[in-house]
Amino acid sequence: MNKKEIFSHEIVLLNQNSNYLCAMHEMILILDFGSQYTQLIARRVREQNIYCEIHPWNKCPELTENIKGVILSGSPFSVRDEDSPKPDLDAIKGKIPLLGVCFGAQYLANNYGGEVLPSKIREYGRANLSFVDKSNELTKGLSMSSQVWMSHGDTIKNVPEGYKIIASTEDVAVAGYQIPGEQTFGIQFHPEVYHSTEGSILLKNYLVDICGCSQDWTPDSFVDETVNNLKKEIANDKVILGLSGGVDSTVAAVLLHKAIGTNLHCIFVDNGLLRKNEFSSVLDSYKGMGLNVKGVNAGELFYSKLNGLTDPEAKRKAIGKVFIDVFDNESKLVDDAKWLGQGTIYPDVIESVSATGGPSATIKSHHNVGGLPDYMKLQVIEPLKLLFKDEVRRIGKSMDIDPKILGRHPFPGPGLGIRILGDVTKEKVAILQEVDHIFISTLKEDGLYDDVWQAGAIFLPIQSVGVMGDERTYENAVALRAVSSTDGMTADWCHLPYDFLAKVSNRIINQVKGINRVTYDISSKPPATIEWE
């Protein structure tokens, strides 16, 4: 993959109060009504090498010449709800291309004279188009019987007078429509979801042919503009950045280093919850990169704050607080440090809070999301905040970062603390480290590591009966988890070979004292998360 390959980019928020709008570049505006899928729309737009921004529906920016089109997202609301979003689209509709997806389509129908009613049967999951208007500029190229993904409890019963139906399924008569005389479209299915097999065709039709976008965003352009913006924002200030050894923090560090050089002070914290030998191996991996890195051993502090905690959110928040405390102490050792750099990426933000201030649901908290306490006098800077994992890897490759670092599986910030269900102890961590080491090492040994997006082991809060030799055992069980994904927003379990699973299970049970049962997690995301907590 060379540096000019198709790459996607969204505006980078450099801190809580600042974002850089690049008026010279064409862009797509996405109005967010709170759907978890909104971020996938952005990702699909960026896959087309087109710049986009997400804004809450009630904080729509002024339309400028560089805004080539607008997409209305889905929503957890029904258009029939009294408190549902009611955007004013007078400045958009009929003036520039407009595409409503799911809720957006239903709003465009209901608000302009159509009828939206509750579905007799909830329309959720795969469906197939039974009618496609192949002459329409939005639906051209779609196959008859093309699979699409539905996710709505309402349906458009009647479109306003004059609306032209351009797609249907057996159960949904109005799967897609256009307002004649306008480049305004509505679709009740989700083209951004992987299960809509020709969704990329529809989106390209809209983005390139209808909106006229030139598809000119690359990793190089992202790096150049981000570095320039960081220079302007930070100037001669000093930045403290937490390294983890993973892709996100490393790419963030290199971007910041390009911008401010030795004014970047990197800290790698051993929270006692890392993988086996990870503290030393990560420090070794940064040698020769020119980064100013300091290792801090704070394991005992983390263990003390986790003592007795069993609730997943309580553990996450405790770990996050200790991270903040450690960085606060370390920042005081750097004269005039004013910023805290973090490798936060979009899925972290999406699952923690609504990234746009809208009503999307919180899935789980992340230790590096949500700002800093008042006592900590550092401003947060997050150069990757609105990027997905695959995009971060492409940026890293364009900056010639070691492929071993770029290919490393994601590892949660709270570490093994959230892979231990129930209370966290040194003994459990030691056991899980060994299990995880065997699992990951065997994946690499068998040439499967690069085929898996993320893998890890979970310490389960149960014991079961086993037999070893002539003895009865009553020991712990672990679950192995391996998933395939591109961005962490959705994931499918990996169909690892049975002989591999058998070998791993045998090694774990024979080599790790305290484990007598190994299970394999075959749930996908959604409905499950990638991590168990």
Image (cartoon, rainbow, N blue to C red):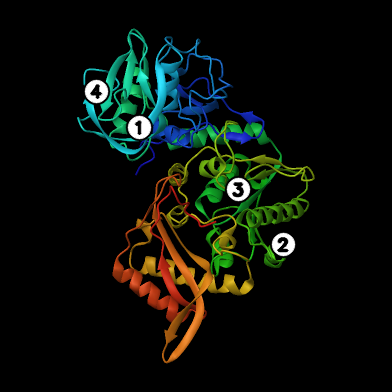
Q: Secondary structure at mark 1?
A: loop
Q: Amino acid at mark 3?
A: Ser
Q: Earlier in the sequence, mark 3 or mark 4?
A: 4
Q: Earlier in the sequence, mark 4 or mark 1?
A: 4
Mark 1 nearby-residue class (10 Å; few <14, some 14–19, many ≥20): many
Disc on the earlier residue, 2 or 3: 2
Q: How crowded is the residue under tag 4: few (<14 C-alpha within 10 Å), some, or many (20+)? A: some
How far apart in space, not on screen, are marks 3 and 1 (Cα)? Answer: 28 Å
What secondary structure is found at the residue carrying circle 3? loop
* Residue 305: assigned label: 2
Residue 140: image tag: 4
The Cα atoms of the two marked residues, 4 and 1, are separated by 14 Å
Say if 524 sits above or below 100 in the image.
Answer: below
Q: Which residue is mark 3?
A: 365
Say whether residue 105 is visible: no
Amino acid type shown at disc 2: Lys
* Quadrant position of residue 421: bottom right
| Residue placed under numbered mark 1 in the picture | 191
Residues at badges 3 and 1 in contact (C-beta under 8 Å)? no
Which of 291 and 503 lies nearest the eye of the viewer?
Answer: 503
